[in-house]
Image: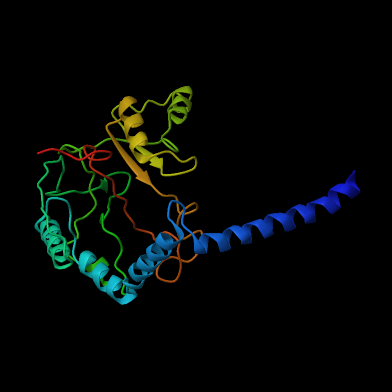
């Protein structure tokens, strides 16, 4: 039985490779749903479209869009919408309309995070500046804030709640630790759960606030070199989320 298996496997592999190559060749000369003549014309059109994109133009456009912050509802965001509309008109699109949609959003007037005991520490709430990325020094970039949260101030003891999942709070209760009215500190991963679920779980447990962080041992400078020398997470980075009213469908005015 072992002998037959050893000889049959290479033969099966050879057939699979042969069929794959045959299918690949076939796909280059025909398109499902097209006649041979129609497929030829379609591929000619597709080749013309593929020849249009330019890496240099893509770099220029990308820089234009990302050169300044464009938070939803800001003047810069509206300017970019008008820019896109004008570019589409230049390309021949006739019915280009910029529509207004009202969505729930927040913009910070002030935000801060500080430890008051046993030692005093105030977080900058900004990503660290890097010479290789001048945008990190842009003063118009707002400090980090939590979208959709009401204004307020919380001063309370901090309780570490591991990954912020229900099982973690159950374990805290077993240890006689109550998080009600406290600030819970949770890891972004290990085990992973969506940050929105972490916040919802903390709210259900009666916590007054939540701090979510990425452990450098799992996602950061402890894993290897960071930007700009490597791909590891830097010491100070922040995440973002979407509007809860437009996650799956458009908002209405």
**Which residue is at the front of the view, 100 or 63?**
100
- Residue 241 in view (yes/no): yes
Describe residue 11's horizontal placement relative to residue 110 as left or right: right
Describe residue 209's horizontal placement relative to residue 9 as left or right: left
Describe residue 99's horizontal placement relative to residue 62 as left or right: left
* Residue 251: quarter of image: top left
Residue at image point 25% right, 73% down: 60
Describe residue 128's horizontal placement relative to residue 214 as left or right: left
Residue at image point 14% right, 49% down: 110
For residue 232, above or below residue 180:
below
What is the x, y in percent for residue 218?
A: 49, 51
What is the x, y in percent for residue 93?
A: 16, 60
- Residue 158 in view (yes/no): no
**Which residue is at the front of the view, 232 or 174?**
232
**Which residue is at the front of the view, 114 or 52?**
52
- Where, quadrant-wise, is the C terminus in this rendering? top left
Give the colour scheme of this rendering. Answer: rainbow
* Residue 106: quarter of image: top left
- Where, quadrant-wise, is the N terminus in this rendering? top right
């Amino acid at each position: 039985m072992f002998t037959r298996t050893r000889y049959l496997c290479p033969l099966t592999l050879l057939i699979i490779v042969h069929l794959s190559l045959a299918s690949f060749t076939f796909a280059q000369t025909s398109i499902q749903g097209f006649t041979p003549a129609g497929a030829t014309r379609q591929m000619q059109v597709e080749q013309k479209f593929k020849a249009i994109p330019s890496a240099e133009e893509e770099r220029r456009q990308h820089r234009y869009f990302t050169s300044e912050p464009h938070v939803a509802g800001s003047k810069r965001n509206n300017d970019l919408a008008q820019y896109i509309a004008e570019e589409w008109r230049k390309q021949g699109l006739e019915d280009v309309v910029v529509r207004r949609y009202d969505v729930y959003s927040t913009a910070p007037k002030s935000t801060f995070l500080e430890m008051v005991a046993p030692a005093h520490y105030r977080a900058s709430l900004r990503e660290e500046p890097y010479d290789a990325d001048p945008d990190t020094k842009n003063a118009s970039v707002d400090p980090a804030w939590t979208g959709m949260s009401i204004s307020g101030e919380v001063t309370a003891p901090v309780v570490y709640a591991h990954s912020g999942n229900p099982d973690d709070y159950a374990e805290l209760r077993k240890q006689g630790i109550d998080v009600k009215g406290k600030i819970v500190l949770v890891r972004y991963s290990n085990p992973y759960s969506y940050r929105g679920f972490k916040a919802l779980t903390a709210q259900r447990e009666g916590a007054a606030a939540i701090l979510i962080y990425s452990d450098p041992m799992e996602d950061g400078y402890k894993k290897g070199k960071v930007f700009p020398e490597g791909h590891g997470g830097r010491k100070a980075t922040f995440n973002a989320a979407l509007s809860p009213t437009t996650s799956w469908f458009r908002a209405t005015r």
